[in-house]
Amino acid sequence: MSFKINLSAWQRRKTEFWNRLWEDLEIGYLDEDLIGILLILNSDKNIYTLSSCSGRITISDSTYPWSREESSVVFKKHIPITINEILDILKKPVVRRLWLNSTGPILHLSTNSLEYADKILSLARKAGLKHSGIISMNPDKGYIIELTSGVKVSHLLRSRGILLAEEDSLREIVDVANEVLLEGKKVLIRMFKVFRSELPWNPDNNIVSDLKNRGINIDKYDPYKIYGKIIRLDNT
Amino acid sequence: MSFKINLSAWQRRKTEFWNRLWEDLEIGYLDEDLIGILLILNSDKNIYTLSSCSGRITISDSTYPWSREESSVVFKKHIPITINEILDILKKPVVRRLWLNSTGPILHLSTNSLEYADKILSLARKAGLKHSGIISMNPDKGYIIELTSGVKVSHLLRSRGILLAEEDSLREIVDVANEVLLEGKKVLIRMFKVFRSELPWNPDNNIVSDLKNRGINIDKYDPYKIYGKIIRLDNT
């Protein structure tokens, strides 16, 4: 197969997602620490970004942490949590099981060539996103890439009637969940650094002038500016 | 880029990995429940398999479950565990943190064309391996694909001096870890079923006659025969 991308359909999707990104940003729906990375990626004319998450702590009431059906997220935060927030949730009744999940960043993007997809995967590995891959390919949508690291824990807090976290241990679990969240933010910082120094390979003039018109300075969105003070960065 | 695979180098690697597979099998190094799936994949002339794991429960002494450096696996099993096995481990001193990890199957394979890689990814999604992707591409090695599901939990058992699992809760944690392991085995069964009905698209005559000479019947290795009796298969 020589896989042929429909470039005009692909470009239409890029424009759509770019507009949606600004809507999300305006209503505060976008994680602030991801904005810089998304702007860098989109400023290359052969890349657009889809959904993304900068890393978060959730509590889900579900049989398994990965369950989608019959599952409800009862708590979600993109910044460190406190023990009191968790204690409040533990007082409420549980339908299935209560899982505390702390996960690193996950990004989806599309490229319009295999060569680009390959280059992005190399960059991702360089930034420490070791579980990245091309998850699908489609003539209109492009080569869809998921960028992700292995940063993730899922700790069982309550199962049926059994509470698995008394207050003492809960304090430790909350500390570790916060630590894991910050490990994810380190990945984000490395990603910004690597992408900022290498991209764009081919500037997208529409995006570049759009950013200029909006008075956007990408470096303002370096996640290091948000997290640099609270985490040690030995490995970055 | 029209990405060009060096077919003779690729074929040499297929032969190498095929020989290694039989060595692993003979020394009992290969998970029995994976053999069928590996044989099906290799019996297509455009596919070879690399490393794989059929799903397992591990306990690691490490800062994080994903840590590689400064980490040691103190327990590993591919079948359900008992609480006594865990109690024994909890008696021993811990250097970092003790994590109980239960994970589903993970397979690595290579194809010699993008078309094939795309077809494999479609099959994988059909089998419920939702986190699969092309993780790298190389003229000699081919398109390297990782097949994996989201089946995974990492539960903190002990952190510094603090034991987070008293005997009562430990019993529940062991039950859930075993349940998660069997969820992974369900993925394995679905994978065998889907791959068996669709592959090979292009039979590899060398492999097919090798299997014949060895008197191998692939259906003997259906993981359903191992696990069908102990797990409910509502969704398969």
Image: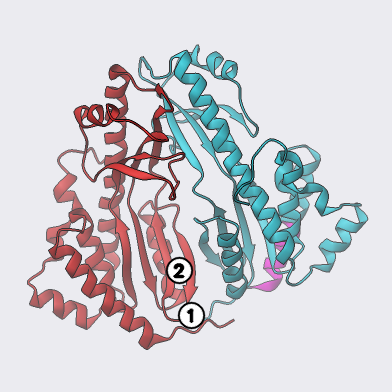
Chain colours: A red, B cyan
Q: Is residue B142 above or below residue A114?
A: above
| Image coords of residue B157 (percent x, y) | 43, 23
| Amino acid type shown at disc 1 | Met
Discs 1 and 2 carry the same chain letter: no
Please name the residue that numbered disc 2 is placed on. A118
Left or right of A39? Residue B44 is right
- Which part of the image, by quadrant, shows the N terminus of chain A? bottom right
Q: Quadrant of residue B12?
A: bottom right
| Image coords of residue A48 (percent x, y) | 31, 72
Q: Main secondary structure of the magenta part?
A: helix
Q: Is any atom of residue A123 visible in this view?
A: yes
Local crowd size for mark 2, using a 10 Å CA cut-off: few (<14), some (14–19), many (≥20): many
Residue B9 included in the magenta stretch of the image? yes
Please name the residue that numbered disc 1 is placed on. B1
User: In front: B158, or B223?
Assistant: B223
User: In front: B231, or A82?
Assistant: B231
- Whole-angstrom CA distance, mark 1 to mark 2, is 10 Å
Left or right of A26? Residue B174 is right
Q: Secondary structure at mark 2?
A: helix
Left or right of B190? Residue A4 is left
Q: Residue at the location (68% across, 67% down)? A: B9
Q: Is any atom of residue A183 visible in this view?
A: no
| Amino acid type shown at disc 2 | Asp
Q: Residue at the location (27% across, 35% down)? A: A178
